[in-house]
Amino acid sequence: MANANRDKSVGFIGLGNVGAKLAGSLLRNGADLTVRDLDKEAAAPLLAAGAKWADSAAEMAANCDILITCLPSPVISAQVLEAEDGLLAGWAPGKIWAEMSTTDETEIRRLGAKIIAMGGRVADCPVSGGCHRAATGNISIFAGCARDVFDDMLPYLTKMGRRILHTGPLGSATVLKVVTNYLATANLVSVAEALSTCAAAGMDLRTSYEAIAISSGTSFVHETEGQVILNGSRDINFTMDLVLKDISLFQDVAVRAGLALELAPLLIDIFKDGIEKYGSREFSPNIIRRLEEAHNLDVTAPGFPAEMSDDEPEAPGYEVVL
């Protein structure tokens, strides 16, 4: 079965900051790849490297065995599937839809039921670890699906990511994805407050960064996004509107589970205010500007990179076995 899977054709829709990098990893690692995006220019590097182009989602579905979507919102994912020329219009039994977008668990199950009713199979496969790791193929991937679907998808997931975790049934990966994005957002806001406090207290910011990095207070966000905050670029290829979407999806999960959370609603309010002040497409680490401007601070320091980079070489992907 695994050998047969390596010969399957893959269609990839959504070539944004993360999607283009995931598609690039598929192509670099030998997949038979067809791509599509509303902006054909986004596909140009992939087409030049040997990928094929689909003029519609329906055409892609008709010609590919595995259909991957990586899109900005649940609404757009639904459009790609359900439009007149969408994936469902070209569907045939036996194909797999893998949703790699950060989406709503109820929506992945609703759309998944349509695919299953047409003889298809479904997995939600969101990624975690940042655009810099998507570029190198070292990103982590969650997969919510039946075990047989996971086994069929694993050779392709390992072309895109390093650590692949089967999280359980359809929708489980989506829940865990918004949980991890919520935690990253909480870390981002706390890092912004910590570095701002160091600046206001007259601390050397490079020393402050290193002290946090070697302490119990460190985090993935501090060690990555903290550097581009201090550089001043604040460029992580992720914007405030996407943060707001993700933490709102997390809040929705909590509400459906009957929880009255305290921190999540506050984070939602903070990012709504950030969007109102700086625009929806502002880089998310610039949430620190709310503190900088309110207190006349400059939370920058020399010697930090303008962009996050993955200094680990690409390594073969593998399943994380529990």
Image: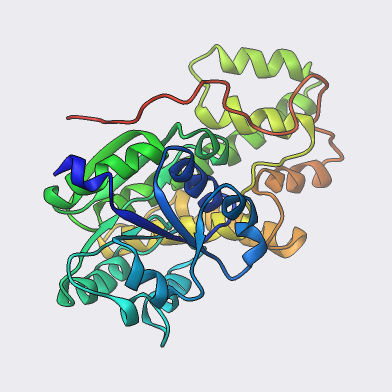
Residue 71: % across, % down: 49, 62
Q: Quadrant of the C terminus?
A: top left
Residue 152 in sight in this render: yes
Outermost residue, right direction? 296
277 displayed left or right of 18: right
99 displayed left or right of 43: left
Q: Please say if 87 is above or below 187.
A: below
What residue lies at 39% left-to-right and 55% top-to-bottom?
A: 100
Q: Please say if 281 is above or below 156.
A: below
Residue 196 in sight in this render: no
Residue nearest the observer in this picture, 79 or 168: 79
Q: Please say if 30 is above or below 102.
A: above
Q: Quadrant of the N terminus?
A: top left
Outermost residue, bottom direction? 84
Coloring scheme used: rainbow
Residue nearest the observer in this picture, 58 or 134: 58
Q: Please say if 101 is above or below 37.
A: above
133 displayed left or right of 69: right
Q: State the image quarter where residue 161 is shown.
A: top left
Q: State the image quarter where residue 198 is shown.
A: top right
Q: How many numbered markers are drawn? A: 0
Residue 110: % across, % down: 26, 74
Residue nearest the observer in this picture, 181 or 291: 181
Residue nearest the observer in this picture, 164 or 185: 164
Residue 212: % across, % down: 59, 18
What residue lies at 74% left-to-right and 26% top-to-bottom?
A: 305
Residue 7: % across, % down: 28, 48
What residue lies at 37% left-to-right and 81% top-to-bottom?
A: 82
110 displayed left or right of 94: right
